[in-house]
Image (cartoon, rainbow, N blue to C red):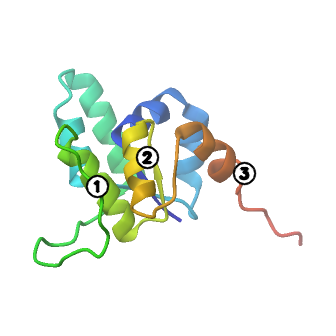
Amino acid sequence: MRVMIDSNILDRLDADTEALDELMNRRDIMLMVTPAQEREIAATPDQARRDHLQGTITQLCRRLALPSPQMPLVVKVPVRKAESADDTIVAVAVAAGCDLLVSEDIDVLNKALAAGSHAMDWKLFLERVVWGSKPRRRKS
């Protein structure tokens, strides 16, 4: 399962070492980030925090390549003037290739849902995906 995580989920991972350890060992869940999340983390003013979050991305996530501007997307995501372009990129990236978006930002979740993607918050992700879908070992 390819799971796009929003930047705010990195904070949740940082606070939940049990979930972080579980996700590091799961091969059925691939966490994805876009250049938007990488830019947001790179702009973190606290260098120690920035280094830590970038380390988490490096260890745990893969970069989702966004479609080129010349290749039009079939997905249409509504954008209002006051909304961030990076939030829209997250929704488009999910629609373009991930199975699920996980975010704590209700606007980002709504954009992903409006684009026809599956989306949930951190708590639901833990309950249903991380702990609820844990692969079972075969009996010998």
N-terminal of the two: label 3 or label 1? 1
Q: Name the residue located 48 percent from the left edge and 36 percent from the top edge.
A: 13
Circles 3 and 1 in contact, beta carbons < 8 Å: no
Tell me the CA gap for discs 3 and 1.
32 Å
N-terminal of the two: label 1 or label 2? 1
Q: Name the residue located 55 percent from the left edge and 49 percent from the top edge.
A: 23
Q: In the rendered view, would you say 122 is above or below 91?
A: above
Q: Quadrant of residue 75?
A: bottom left
Residue 138 can be seen in this image: yes
The number of discs equals 3
The x and y percentages for residue 118 are 51, 59
Q: Which residue matches tag 1?
A: 78
Bin the neighbour count of mark 2 within 10 Å (Cα to Cα): few under 14, some 14-19, many 20 and up. many
Question: Which mark is drawn over residue 109?
Answer: 2
Circles 1 and 2 in contact, beta carbons < 8 Å: no
In front of the other: label 2 or label 3?
A: 2
